[in-house]
Every structure is written in C-alpha cells, then in structure tokens.
Image: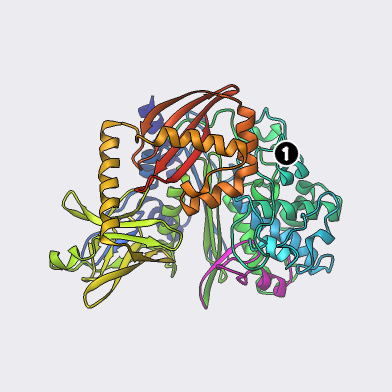
Amino acid sequence: MIRLFIAALGAAVLAGSLANLSMADDSINIRIQQVTQQMPPPVLVRGETPVVTSLATRMTELSVPAVSIAVIHNGRIEWARGFGVTQWDGPSVTERTVFQAASISKPVFALAVLRLADSGKVDLQANVNDYLTSWKVPDSAFTSQAPVTLRALLSHTAGTTVHGFRGYEPTATLPTLTQILDGVSPANSSPVRVDTVPGTRYRYSGGGYVIAQAALQDLTGVPTARYLLKVVLQPLGMKNSTFEQPLPASRAAEIAMPYRADGSQVAGGARIYPEQAAAGLWTTPSDLARYALGVNAALQGEKDAIISAPMARTMLTPVLNGRGLGPQVGGTTPRMYFAHDGGNDGYRCLMVVYEDGEGAVVMTNSDNGGVIAQEVMRSVASAYGWPDFAPSLRTLVDVNPERLERLIGAYQFDDGSIYVVRRYAGRLTGHELGQTPVDLFPSSDHEVFARDADLVVDFEGVNDTITAMQLGIGETERRAVRVTEARSQRVFAWLDSTENRFRTQSAAPESEAAIRSLLVGITAGKPDYRNMSPALADSISQQLPGLQQWLTWLGELKSLKFERVDANGRDEYRGEFAQGPLRIFIRLNENGRVEHAEFAPG
C-alpha cells in the first residue's frame, strides 16, 4: 500500500509540474525547475560536487502528500504551484488548495490590531485591561511592576504563559475564549497567566495572542473571523482565506487533509482552533504572499496601504530577540526580511519575505512538512540569489587526528543542557543529548562543521586546553562550557548505556518509577521539580494547571506497560487510565533526573 501511495504521489508531483511548466515563460520555468528539481544540500563544501535532490523525492521519503509554494520576485507573485495530492488517492493540489497556517496566523492577526492603533482607537503601550471587558489579566506582583500591553502581547514580551495549543477534534465541545484564558473545561490548555515582569523577557506565547484576540473582540463587538475578514483579508485580496473555526463544511473539498509523520492521516481530520489569533487561519501560499506584499506596500508608503508607513516600520522593528509585532525580523541592511513559521496538528508552513520584494511561502499537510519547508526555502534562496537561507559554504581541511582528540568532551549550556563531542564508529560526532548525532568535519584544528545541517562548532581554549565551545546553527549561537572530565565520563557511559538499551529495546531501570512519581506529583499539583532538568521544570510549571486537570480527568492509573526505546533514548510506555489510554515518553539523564517527559493520547 505504501508503494502505491509513493507512486501516486510521484506521478501527481511530476504531472502537476509538467502541466504548469508549459504555461510559464522560459526564465520562470528555469527557476521553477531549479527550485523543485535541483534542491541543494544545507552545506556546500569547496571543491566537491553537491548532491542535489528533487521535491518529489523528498515528499516520497518523508511521506508528505501535499506541498504548495508561492514565490515573490521583483515585488509580485512570480509563480505559485501545488504539488502532490490533498490526501492519498485524492485530487491533485493546486495553488488554491487551503492549509492551516498555524502560527503564521499571528502576524496576519497583528495587522488588525495595528490598523486600530493607526486610527487612534487603541494605544499599543496602554494596559490591555483598558480594552478587555469579558475577561481581565489577573493582577499580580509582576503586573504591578509593568502593565501587559498590546505591543508586548504581539511581540511575545508580555510575560504570558502557554506556548501553543493542541486544537480540538471536530466532535469536541469547543471552549469560549474566557474558558481558554482561564484553562477551565472544556479547554485543553493551561490558564494564560503572567509569570514574569512584562517587557523584560522574550518568550513565545500563543496565550498572549488569545488575550489580544479577546481585547479585539471586546473592543469592536464583532466576532474575530468576521472582523479579520473585513479589515485584513478582503483589503489584501486574500480571497481564499478565512479565520473561521471550524471551516465551513461547504469548503471541505478545498483543503489538504492533515497527516502524521508516518504517512497516516490525522484521526478525525483537521483540528479546530478557537484560538484564532494564535493558530486559526486557513489560507494558501499565494494569499500569504499577498499579506506580505501588503506589508511591503505599507513600508513604501503606497496610497491605500493596509497600514501607514510608520506603523509598518513599528511592526517590523524588533522588540526583543529579533521579534517585531507579529513577525520575526532578520537580515542586514539593505536586505532586511520578516518571517514566521507555523505548526498545527498535521500541518507545517514557512514564510520568508524581504522588504525589497523577494520572498516565498511554503505550506504542507504533514507533521514532517517542516523539514521540506526549510529545504524548499533553501532551494528558493539558492535559485533567486538571496543573501540568507541558501546553503552555507564550508572548507574541509586535513587536521592531525590528535588535534581533534582534544575537542572530545561534554559541554554545558546556560540552560543545563549538554552537548557531546566524541568518536563514534571511527567518526567525530556531535549532538545535544536527546538529539540525533551528526558527523563533524574539520575546517581548522578548533572548528568543525556538519554536512547535513547548517551547524558549526568553534572551540575556545587556554594554552591548547579546550574550555568552551560556541555552537552556531543557522543564525542562532549558543555558548557552552566544558564540564569536568569525571562528568564527561558519566555522560559517555550514559550514552553507551542508552545505545545498548536501544539495541536491546530494554527500559531504563528507573524510568517506570520516575513516570509514576511524575504522574502523582502533577495530579496533586506538586511535581518534584528537583528531580527534573531546569528546562523540563520550567515547561511543567507553565503547563501545570492544564496537565493537572487532564490527568485528574483521566482518573486512576490501571496499568503501565513498557513499549519501546526510540532512537533518541526515550522510553515509551502505555498507561491505561480509567478514562482511556495515554502514551508516555520519558528520558533520564546521567544523574537519574528526568530530562524529558511527554504525554500523548493513546
């Protein structure tokens, strides 16, 4: 059956490509072929011929049924194409097939708030409680120091909790905005609260956008989807887009159905997201390109633009961590860009647009689609000569193996996570614990790079003794300090043990007890944070009310059965509760602390 799916997918991609190519002019045809048929690797090595691949091949390898692309060139949509099928054995994807935009909903929603600010109806710096009537941001020691503002909410600097949302099955009872914000049934997320001083820290928060959605709705008295249609989607010509949740049944034939990473369809179909500002937009790459072109038109001060030029510049001015009011902002003058990605259940998408009128949008209908979206964006960047996102160019040099041996060790980041460099099967490898190792190649005796990812590790030292490293992944850099030799050896022993457990498919001796303790602690509202890594403790504390509510609803744990060890060293268990099954993933670090924990419906 899988082979039949693959054959159908490859034929649909090829047929769709050939049919559309004959209709485009030669220069565009060449670029479309380059983007879809000559996709480059993430890293090019000087003196080596790169191994390219095709979109059809990658869709087959990753079991992604549908990909849709729109490319902006010279300030207009140069081409838009759909590839693959909307569902296995279903119709072909076209440029009008709609996908869930997931978090790309946020920068589109932000335009509605900025239009209100442009007209003087809201003050982006005012306390958002001045505009909320149906609900209020609770007063706290944090909000007493600084108010929560629309500017902070749109830039993820308001100190609000709840990173993202899981969505609801089509048959589920949907919560109101107030229920979502307070984390009460039937909401399946934690309460949205302020737990740091607003304006002092960047932390991505879908919950903050739900507050902004409530403020917009209270202020205008109009339902979110209807208001956004009138003030954003229609003015920008986004004719195939809507914030309606659920999508009207009359449009069911227009959508690409959502799929899991293994190629199976998401049970029950597309999830419903009443958190419309954060994740509720249904759209196409062409319509998102129209959004981006509308922002650029505003930047240029064009007549009848969606917002004024000063407001557009405010939108694209970073507040913290490169985040503007909605989009992420990057690049260097004069080639600045704004971008956003998105991931809902069974959908992944990516948008990158330069202020000078170049860009692309990629949408997919698979949990694996994020990989393809990045690869397509890299291919577009290469074909169109962008200064960013194209493959990195590295130089491979011969280095005395003894010089590389001194790099081997364990290095700790500020958040407590560990990066390991070691010899494995005769190769130098590196990875953060819990992630897949990558082979490392020397560009000098103190710098190494990966071929399969845009990753560089630069080592620092004193008198030839390595003391720290700088990890660069794309534009992100993190510094880690070398741990003691004794701890390095414990980490290496833990890795050896984990690899052996993966080969023999045997659980870590302490994992079942750790799961039971974690379940008891969360259900009681008193998890043992001392027995968790700092990152996990922070995550659990943010989600605690929602997790506690969920586990309480599941009821008594009847049985807990080990299922398998995955390639990243996580033990998977199946818990049978009074109300149904739950898949539980757990990984302990070299000190026996819980480093990773994840719960998924059975």
Give x and y (percent) for residue 182.
Answer: 73, 45
How many residues crowd around disc 1 within 10 Å: few (fewer than 14), some, or many (20 or more)?
some
Residue drawn at x 66%, y 57% as measured from the top left: 195
Give x and y (percent) for residue 551.
Answer: 60, 33
Q: Is residue 323 magenta?
A: yes
Which residue in the structure is indicated by mark 1? 184
81 with respect to 498 (left or right): right
Q: Is residue 129 magenta?
A: no
Please identify the quadrant where the N terminus is shown: top left
90 with respect to 292 (left or right): left
- 73 or 316, nearer to the observer: 316
- Report whether residue 284 is seen: no
Residue drawn at x 77%, y 58% as measured from the top left: 139
Give x and y (percent) for residue 426.
Answer: 16, 52
Compared to residue 229, the image places residue 402 above or below, namely below
Residue drawn at x 45%, y 44% as measured from the top left: 596
456 with respect to 558 (left or right): left
Res 399 quadrant in image: bottom left
Start and end of the magenta stretch? 306-333
